[in-house]
Image: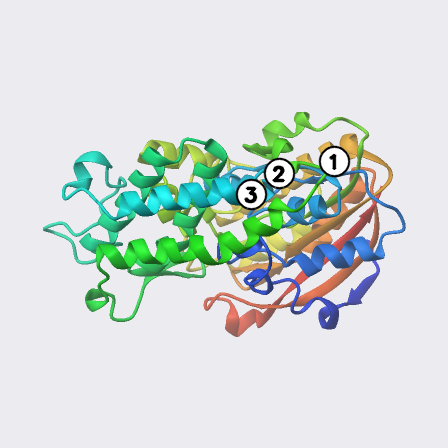
Amino acid sequence: MYKDYKFIDCSEKYQSVMQFDKNKNVFVHRWYPFVEGYSKEFIEGILGELSFKPKCALEPFCGSGTTPVELQNHNIKCYSFEVSPFMHLLSTVKLGRQYNVDTFEYYVKAVTKKLSHTSRNIRKIEPIPFGNTVVKKEESKKWNFHDNAIDGILDIRYAIRTTVDNDDYKNLFTIALASIIIQASNVFRNGKCLSYKNGWETRIFSRKDIHNFFLERLNSIFAEDIRIISKQNSSVNNSEICYLGDVRTNIQQVPNGKVDLIITSPPYLNSRDYTDIYMLELKVLQLINSYEELRELRKNTLRSHVQVPYDKILPIENERLQDSISKMLNNKQNTWNSDIINMICAYFEDMQFLFSEFAKKMHKDGVIYFNVANSAYYGVEVPVDFIIADIAESCGFKIREIRKARDLKTSPQQSNIIGKLRESVIVIDY
């Protein structure tokens, strides 16, 4: 018999704040147009309803850094983890509070000067990112960048590397470069993948256009925010405890019994591989430089996709999960990937491990806000929120309530059977 939990429809409250899109004009968050994740208002709402002032928080899936950045703004210490080297770089740059207006402007002038005298053969100095589709080749039908665009990007990368000799500012300028990569490319983010823009074949920028995109970003929103940061004094620096790597193998960095707040949104059980979605940034910024490095990165991500094979996994002891799998096996006919059920089992095994670790890290009376979404495969909805609630309780936590945040669209394969899927915020007490 399934355990019942208090369930509240909070879609009116959460509908808009669960989207990062609200951050696109917000201080520091606007430095890079992140697609996934929640807004700063989500964090503000949580802090507003707490009956205590948190002293130590944890964000196991940092993403673009919304949680540690907003907690830092409230002088709350936050340990955070991010497996993607690009997202980790983005988070630590946004958490930085050591920037100075004069130094920033000095480097902007130096980079601008460098870009006014570019090398004709930039590709001999700066290597093109690895991969067969980055630029046009003889056999190519599609490619990510036209020649002028990639040369303009390489100009910028070379200018940053050779004129910015301070790592903090070098990383800051690198994020400014990252923020124009999709704009300069022939593709756009389309759900789980990158798709080609309409008319991309004739949408051609000059090298100077690419330089100007970059310099305009530096001289507008980056410059404005650096002026604000220069006047701030923060007693907390969460960048020093934002760790690059898989939280499952690195959570020992967090002291036991100290965490009183966890706010996170783990990768959803939707087969989305974020290394694919942010592949251009990873390649262009030389954060991954080979297919071997790419495979290794995928291996270290939470098991929520099928881009790498997993060992055979048995489902954890959970009646809801086992019932869902049983229904899938009965319905299983035409499937786009035979590893789906194994991925589902692996995902919840990861969740069980994480909550067992959370129990070690949490302080008595701490609270967790866990943002997840249900999934559907083979015409069967997987109640991810309720299964995770069961897992949390099995690890010694108490579910206060499950809050419906909003409805999400299903994949085209499931839409006729399932309709919509629920996104939830699970509020968990310790």
166 sits left or right of 373 in the view: left
Helix, strand or loop at label 3? It is helix
Sequence order check, earlier mark of 3 and 1? 3
Viewer-nearest of discs 2 and 3? 3
Q: Position of residue 361 (x, y in %)?
A: 77, 31
Up-down relation of residue 215 to residue 293 (above or below): below
The mark found on residue 91 in the picture is 3
Q: Marks 3/1: CA distance? A: 22 Å
Residues under numbered marks 2 and 3 in contact, where contact means CB atoms less than 8 Å apart: no
Helix, strand or loop at label 1? It is helix
Q: How many marks?
A: 3
Q: Marks 2/3: CA distance? A: 24 Å
Q: Which residue is mark 2?
A: 350
The quarter holding residue 349 reads top right
Up-down relation of residue 9 to residue 240 (above or below): below
Sequence order check, earlier mark of 2 and 1? 2
- Residue 174 visible in the snapshot: no
Of residues 156 and 274, the one nearer the viewer is: 156
Viewer-nearest of discs 2 and 1? 1
> In percent of the image, x 47 and y 48: which residue is there?
274
Q: Position of residue 374 (x, y in %)?
A: 62, 59
